[in-house]
Image: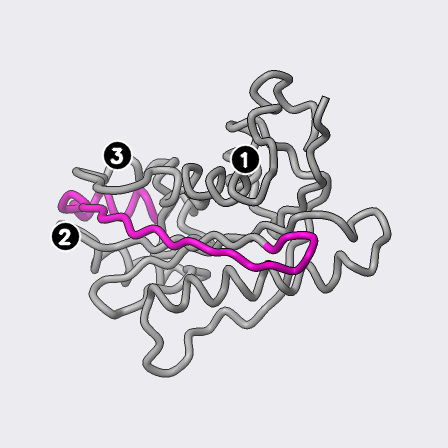
Amino acid sequence: MTERPKLVLASASPRRLALLEQVGLRPDALLPTTIDEDPARFERPRALAERLAVDKAQTARRIGLQEEALKDAFFLAADTVVAVGRRILPKTENIEDATECLELLSGRAHRVYTAVCIVTPTGKQRSRIVETRVRFKHLSRPELDSYLASHEWRGKAGGYAIQGIAGSFVVRIVGSYSAVVGLPLYETVSLLSGEGVPVHLGWLNPLDGV
């Protein structure tokens, strides 16, 4: 039987890990990276998402190559950016930022850009970016206050996670739900398959390993 090469996920996100496992992929290692995620001056949301995904994948590879067991692995990273027009919303760490983001999103449409990048064992880099439009309902004051009290917004781009409570705010989504969660599954599987990774083996023997 064909053996799948090793896969390293450059993330500590339980959401991205769960999405990979959903399609039968279990990373051999998690290698979250610490990089500067601040946008450059005049950097657009799409460009930021792609740059950060690439930086994460390449940084993880540089670290991973120091380990003999990972020298022939694929390195996978993703990044998600929430934007209103050209305005990039932060990953909210305090209630003031969360309030500002949610008041801005209330009753209007915004865009979520999620980029995925893989670096192959030979150092080849491939990436895709997915743009999804999301429209929120108008949030009443009680709804907003209750959501803020939940603390679910903490560390989330734009102050929300679509797979959580905030899913009830979504009136319409045009694009990829999994991309808004954090990893576009169609594009991820396509990239890996395109580089010869037999992704389907995980469908025959779910979570047997990559």
Spot occupied by residue 41 in the image (x, y as percentages of width and height)? 37, 83
The extreme right residue here reads: 68
Quarter location, residue 179: top left
- Numbered range of the magenta stretch: 119-148
**Mark 1, mark 3: which one is toward the viewer?**
1
The extreme top residue here reads: 204
Residue 71 vs residue 83, the one in the foreground: 71
Callout 2 secondary element: loop
Quarter location, residue 185: top left
Q: What numbered label is drawn on residue 20?
A: 1
Spot occupied by residue 2 in the image (x, y as percentages of width and height)? 70, 27
The crowd level at tag 1 (other Cα within 10 Å; few <14, some 14-19, many 20+) is many
Spot occupied by residue 138 in the image (x, y as percentages of width and height)? 13, 46
The crowd level at tag 2 (other Cα within 10 Å; few <14, some 14-19, many 20+) is some
Residue 161 vs residue 26, the one in the foreground: 26
**Residue picked out by circle 2:** 108
**Residue picked out by circle 3:** 168
Callout 3 secondary element: helix
Q: CA distance from mark 1 to mark 3?
A: 24 Å
Contact, mark 1 vs mark 2 (Cβ under 8 Å): no
- Is residue 203 shown above or below 61? above
For image coordinates 62% across by 63% down, the residue present is 58
Asked if residue 143 lies in the magenta stretch, the reply is yes
Q: Quadrant of the N terminus?
A: top right
Q: Is residue 198 left or right of residue 138?
A: right
Q: Amino acid at mark 1?
A: Leu
